[in-house]
Amino acid sequence: MPVKRGVKPVAQNRKARHDYFIEETLECGIELFGTEVKSLRKGACNLKDSYAQVKNGELFLIGMHISPYEQGNIFNKDPFRTRKLLAHKSEIRKLQAASQKDGMSLVPLEVYLKDGRMKLELAIAKGKKLYDKRHTLAERDADREMDRRIKEDRS
């Protein structure tokens, strides 16, 4: 079976962009078992409360839920198990340094299929305060209102 080229989104963490300022993103691989890949291809994944952490020079994803594969049997794994992320050593060191700064976190943004392999977009992010979230919502509403007015003027 030939490998399909291109990118196919599987799951997104929309809440992350609302709760965090995204400083930098990084693409990394995920160490998965066969039934997990089959389940991900169906889109049975939730990134809502997940985060990444560096332990002993290795990068791990904690809290990501992958639903058990329906046709799977004894090979199904725990849906919330900790999964290893695949990245270069220099990238892991950079992520570790960034995550140790005050208020910085490693947050997964998206899981997607790229050239037949599951990839994860990981972000170095800083948490937003409540007033930052309100400000972002106000800006978005103002932009929508301006676009609506421009559209009305052109018509």
Image (cartoon, rainbow, N blue to C red):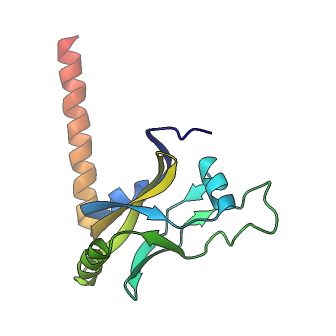
Q: Nearer the viewer, residue 53 or 116?
A: 116
Instruction: Tell me where residue 131 sits by quadrant.
Output: bottom left
Instruction: Tell me where residue 78 sits by quadrant.
Output: bottom right
Q: Is residue 144 above or below residue 113?
A: above
Q: Residue at x 26, y 84 (%)?
A: 100
Residue 65 in percent (x, y) is at: 59, 65
Residue 152 in percent (x, y) is at: 23, 17
Q: Residue at x 82, y 63 (%)?
A: 73
Residue 24 in percent (x, y) is at: 24, 62
Q: Nearer the viewer, residue 113 or 14?
A: 113
User: Is residue 67 visible from the viewing direction of this image?
Assistant: no
- The answer to whether 57 appears left or right of 46 in the picture is left
Residue 17 in percent (x, y) is at: 34, 57
User: Is residue 103 visible from the viewing direction of this image?
Assistant: yes
Instruction: Tell me where residue 13 sits by quadrant.
Output: bottom left
Q: Residue at x 45, y 56 (%)?
A: 119
Number of marks present in the image shown:
0
Q: Nearer the viewer, residue 124 or 5?
A: 5
Of the 4 image quadrants, the one containing the N terminus is top right
